[in-house]
Image (tube, coloured by chain):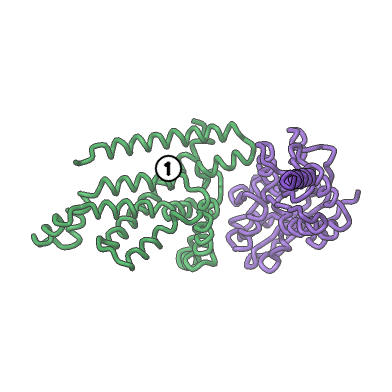
Amino acid sequence: MPAAALTPLLLTLKVALFATLLATLFGVLFARTLGRKRSVARDVAESLLTLPLVLPPTVLGYYLLVVLGRNGVIGSWLLDHFGITLIFTWQGAVIAAAIAAFPLILRSARAAFADVDASLEQAARTLGLREGAVFFRITLPLAWRGVLAGALLAFARAMGEFGATLMVAGSLPGRTQTLALAIYDAVMAGDDARAAMLVWISLLVAIVVLLIAARLLQRRRP
Amino acid sequence: MQAFRRRRFVALSLAAALATAPAVAADLTVSAASSLANAFADLGHAFEVAHPGDRVVLNLAASDVLLRQIEQGAPADVFASADETTMDRAAATKSIDPATRRDFAGNTLVLIVAAAARVPKALDELAGPGYPHIAIGNPESVPAGRYARQGLVDAKLWDALQPQLVPTQNVRQALDYVARGEAQAGFVYATDAAVLKDKVRVALVVPTATPVRYPIAVTAASAHAQLARSFVEFAASADAQAVLGRHGFASVAR
């Protein structure tokens, strides 16, 4: 594979992987916090946390640019205390992709946790397990397929992230230019051969991810 | 008899409406380079006043992007690009009517810096400290980036500055990055810098071997060729030149 395609591919996988890890960590955490009981507060919280899925990516990109930028609340703090800037970096792309992918894992994980038989959790509690232990030893092992399905969706979404990434991380070849951005640049520059090659690579990667997903999720318990 | 007469009246009205239809209420799609955004919004309004019923719909992007859209069959009526290179390619791919092509404005490429950044006195100071990110239109698809690349190559800085360059999708994105302070410096047109003159400062004028010129033409596939031709003529008229001049564009002596 030519370097012109390998670099964006590796970068895409790196960004999507880190973004998925971040999104999964927070998605599972929030899914557990939201809990089983329906209430107005929970519905409002879940709607707010789902916003990145329904808002245009440019809205997300705009807010990230405003918050993470060097004049933003978080951006200026990071710059003053650690000398870190996230704009125009692959880490910035990770954050954009993670936020875009987060609702997918939140919703899958919450549904998966809700499907776990509450009496099993209750039994564990009566046997003296603390809440944390109940979650890690009962709920999560029973719900892992749902969490994994959400993580795979999140990975796919992170790989395809475009709008917010473009605004926050830019399209710097070799540094922040993921496959999606490289395809856009190639098309805009009239380089159809390069665009076609990158499209084929994206297709291949997507198929491989789907095959892995099918394999992992195959044996569903009755 | 009464019914017949009424039917004939309806038929006549319909015929009249159809006959006059091509002359009324056309949407003229003008694909214009990003740097023309503010000036063409004004030009569009002036044109609408002169042509009651017609509407000017602006489609703004980097010139190369606009040409790609037109080549792929986007229903644009007028194409205004920020350099001759793009219009030459449009002519080569038969995307425009070459007889309608004319230059209607000129511009200057400038180096801008963020409000907080040090103001360089010469281009080569960009290689020194203080400018980790320099915004520049992607030369592969943005004319402003091509002019800037030419200026940097002539100044023998193109290779040295590579690690600092942040390529943007159009010239206004370069302006935005500098205005936000994410990029410390950037290459835009003088007219762009004037749009955000409270946020960016013009450090110097970048000399370009090719002068910055804006050609305009009717697209080959325009569905409103007559109206499109009047818009192209209007852009070169004294009235339009006055509007462009207010936005800082140079008039092109013809």
Determine the image quadrant of residue B195. Answer: bottom right
Give the amino acid at mark 1.
Leu
Q: Position of residue B41 (x, y in %)?
A: 73, 58
Task: Point out the image quarter for the N terminus of chain B.
Answer: top right
Q: Nearer the viewer, residue B207 or B94?
A: B94
The crowding category of the residue bearing disc 1, from other C-alpha atoms within 10 Å (few below 14, some 14 to 19, many at least 20), is some
Q: Chain of mark 1?
A: A
Q: Is residue B74 left or right of residue A115?
A: right
Q: Residue at x 28, y 40 (%)?
A: A217
| Chain letter matching colour purple | B
- Relative vertical location of residue B247 with respect to residue A112 in this rendering, above or below: below
Q: Which residue is mark 1?
A: A13
Location of residue B63 (image quadrant): top right
SS assignment at label 1? helix
Q: Position of residue B224 (x, y in %)?
A: 77, 43
Q: Is residue A10 left or right of residue A152?
A: right
At horizontal 55% and vertical 32% (from top left) the residue drawn is A196
Rendered green, the chain in question is A
Q: Is residue B42 left or right of residue A120?
A: right
Give percent across and percent down for residue A197. 53, 32
Q: Quadrant of residue B100?
A: top right
Q: Position of residue A114 (x, y in %)?
A: 24, 55
